[in-house]
Amino acid sequence: MDLTARINSVAPSPTLAISARAQAMRSDGIDVISLSAGEPDFPTPAPIIDAAKRAMDDGKTGYVATAGIEPLREAIADDYARRGRQIDADQVVVSVGAKQGLYNAAQVLFEEGDRVLVPAPYWVSYPAQVKLAGAEPVTLDCGIESEFKLQPNQLERALADESVKGLILCTPSNPTGATYSAQELRELGAILKDYPDVAVIFDAIYDQIYYGGELSADLTAEVPELADQVVTFNGFSKAYAMTGWRLGYAIGPSEVIGAMGKIQSQSTSNATTFVQYAALEAFDLDASLLANRRDRFQDRRDLILSKLDDIDGVECPRPEGAFYVFPDFSHYVGAGAPFEDDMALAEFCLDEAHVATVPGSAFGTDGHLRFSYATSESEIEEGLDRIIRALPES
């Protein structure tokens, strides 16, 4: 059978591929430290696990509404009220992870001939999801000099192209941890509101892992005039250490949310029922639990930055959210350097230092490596020490 051009235009996720290779090495008895996967090493909070058990015992294991159970959608709406947004439950759709929601949004918002702005460094799935919708991703390079953030003049120039129908914005960012302040979002929003036909995908999955406070800034809360053109994405995977539970959600205009539900009705139908009931507990957790985990992540961030400072020629901005750093290793790659490109450097780190990282080119920015510090302090320290010992002179 012949595969379609659509699927042949998309590469597998490099982060998952590297994690799989690292796991295969471990299976062969090799001591590999993984600084590649964006998965917290904390356990899912016990009240959520207990609620899942109760839900199963209570028979909550059948089909429910595709868009999600009403109590969960209402809880999400109530939670967003504290972020300065008043939304109704019918503006929420619950999905099988935020990734499915992002895919569904691309399917209902973009089509052939559309161009979608994707600031780089970007999460690896954004361009692929745009391509799978038949549209064209347009990379906007946001380098280390701008702390990996899209600048207003850069956005304004890109929007001069009338074929641009979308923008994808992630804060705090995967892979950089860069986080837009409220003022920065207002500056971008002031431009976007003059382009009402441009849909904005606002990925806030890391908004509770923010080192400047309880929550990072929300685009629509800062610029309410954008409510009809922004779809916000969030979920339970990162802050609540529920990656394997696969539960996310989207918030946006009712018409768009309804269309996303229609797509979902023809793919997975509802997200797992007892998981939805369990997630209700997340909104009643003691605030100190997330605060303590956030403090641990911040300590790990400071540790990994201090280790990176020991590597000559490496520069790394201090991230304000998520659990990634994105250091510039261009001193070690390219003509006259030890490694041809960042993929060769990442392979060296895995093969010689037995440390799994992800090359920056996977995120649209060459010459970098992404490290996840969603692991123990001892693994972070040992992993960076191994890389430091293994790296050749540049």
Image: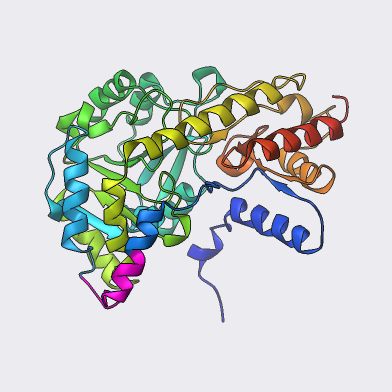
Closer to us: 244 or 262: 244
Closer to us: 4 or 46: 46
Asked where in the image residue 211 lies, by quadrant, the reply is top left
Q: How many marks?
A: 0
Asked where in the image residue 291 lies, by quadrant, the reply is top left
* Place of residue 191 in the rendered image (x, y in percent of width and height, measured from the top left): 26, 24
* Place of residue 339 in the rendered image (x, y in percent of width and height, measured from the top left): 81, 35
Q: Which residue is drawn at 26% across and 39% down?
A: 198
The answer to whether residue 59 is above or below residue 216 is: below
55 in magenta: yes
Q: With 314 as the anchor, is 374 left or right in this view?
A: left
Q: Which residue is drawn at 16% across and 61% down?
A: 70
The answer to whether residue 382 is above or below residue 281 is: above
117 in magenta: no
Q: With 336 as the anchor, is 364 left or right in this view?
A: left
Closer to us: 336 or 293: 293
* Place of residue 165 in the rendered image (x, y in percent of width and height, measured from the top left): 30, 43
Q: Which residue is drawn at 28% across and 66% down?
A: 263
Is there any visible trace of residue 170 in the rendered image? no
Quarter of the picture containing the N terminus is bottom right
Q: Which residue is drawn at 45% across and 30% down?
A: 321
Query: Farthest residue toward the bottom?
Result: 1
* Place of residue 62 in the rendered image (x, y in percent of width and height, measured from the top left): 27, 78
Residues in magenta, as a range: 52-64
Q: With 202 as the anchor, is 293 left or right in this view?
A: right
Quarter of the picture containing the C terminus is top right
